[in-house]
Image (spheres, grey):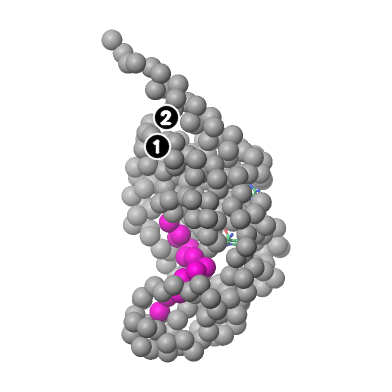
Amino acid sequence: MYGDIVILSGAGISAESGIPTFRDSDGLWNNHRVEDVATIEAWYKNPAAVHAFYNQLKKDIADKQPNPAHLAITRLQREYKNGAVNVVTQNVDLLHEKAGNTNVWHIHGQIDQAVCMRCGRVLPAAGDMDEKAVCPSCGVAGKIKPNIVFFGENLLYMDKVEALLARCRLFVSVGTSGAVFPANTFARTAKYHGAETVEFNVGETVNRYDFDRHVTGPAGTTLPAFVDELLKERTEEADIVGDR
Ligand code: NAD
């Protein structure tokens, strides 16, 4: 296979690392209702509670390690020579980075960052944050929010993502339910531009008709096998000298 590859990951890719998905937790995130901790209204209403939630989430996932699905992407990025491999993730955890993945686009934000809602500056946030913090860039207090995209906010890096979707020849979706807009439109966009689309999930997804191929099973098993197959195909293609 030749051409660029885009991998879209969702909470399911991190499930085997011990980070639960919404679905595995009855729609709760770390025992909290999404409306209380992941909407822009919740942030304006009770920023202290929102900070407390993300401070705890940061602690809970700090020691989690990448699983074979993340590591398969590292191998693909190292060994695939026929194009670029980009990772577009809905996850706020950093397991792609811990696995050594590069070109990772956190469209829903990331747990180790904050953003000033006044001046827009993105800041490192390795430790605890609170609602009184002063922005080092604009000097205003009380406007620093976790750099997590809440329902009601725009996704990050969308121009980049649109360009990647238009160029890729293979679109791979891993561990995402297809229920969250607009990530659930990416497969259709890539397909419209001519890409082959493949999804990896333990169950059925909402947007399954946008995929040419479905691989059912835990991503920690199915994705490494797929990467082996893809890289083997590449080696076999390299053995062909050419046409007369
Ligand atoms: P989701 O919870 O709605 O869906 C997860 C999907 O993963 C499901 O379709 C499930 O069948 C599948 N799945 C579960 N275990 C799997 C496995 N071992 N292998 C393959 N697939 C598996 O998650 P979502 O669609 O990603 O959307 C929820 C949003 O919540 C995300 O966009 C993210 O912002 C946030 N979230 C992030 C994390 C994280 O950072 N790890 C965890 C929970 C929620």
Residue 118: quadrant of the picture: bottom left
Quarter in which the N terminus is drawn: top left
Q: Separation of disc 2 and disc 1 at Cα?
A: 9 Å
Looking at the rendering, the stretch of residues picked out in magenta corresponds to 105-116
**Is residue 37 magenta-colored?**
no
Residue 16 visible in the shown view: yes
- Label 1 is placed on what type of residue? Arg
Q: Nearer the viewer, residue 131 or 190?
A: 131
Q: Main secondary structure of the magenta part?
A: strand
What numbered label is drawn on residue 169?
Answer: 1
Q: Earlier in the sequence, mark 2 or mark 1?
A: 2
Q: Position of residue 156 (x, y in %)?
A: 41, 63
Residue 14: quadrant of the picture: bottom right
Element type at mark 2: loop
Please give the residue where the numbered disc 2 appears in the rendered image: 1
Q: Is residue 205 left or right of residue 24?
A: left
Q: Nearer the viewer, residue 208 or 72?
A: 72
Residue 191 visible in the shown view: no
Please tell me which residue is depicted at 50% across the width and 27% down the height of the picture: 232
Please tell me which residue is depicted at 60% across the width and 45% down the height of the picture: 68
Please tell me which residue is depicted at 58% across the width and 74% down the height of the picture: 54
**Is residue 108 magenta-colored?**
yes
- Above or below, 140 against 108 in this view is below
Q: Are marks 2 and 1 in contact (CB under 8 Å)?
A: yes
Please tell me which residue is depicted at 43% across the width and 64% down the height of the picture: 155
| Residue depth check, mark 2 versus mark 1: number of the one nearer the observer | 2
- Above or below, 172 against 151 in this view is above
- Label 2 is placed on what type of residue? Met
Ligand 1 contact, mark 1 (Cβ < 8 Å): no
> What crowding class fits label 1: few (fewer than 14 Cα within 10 Å), some (14-19), or many (20 or more)?
many
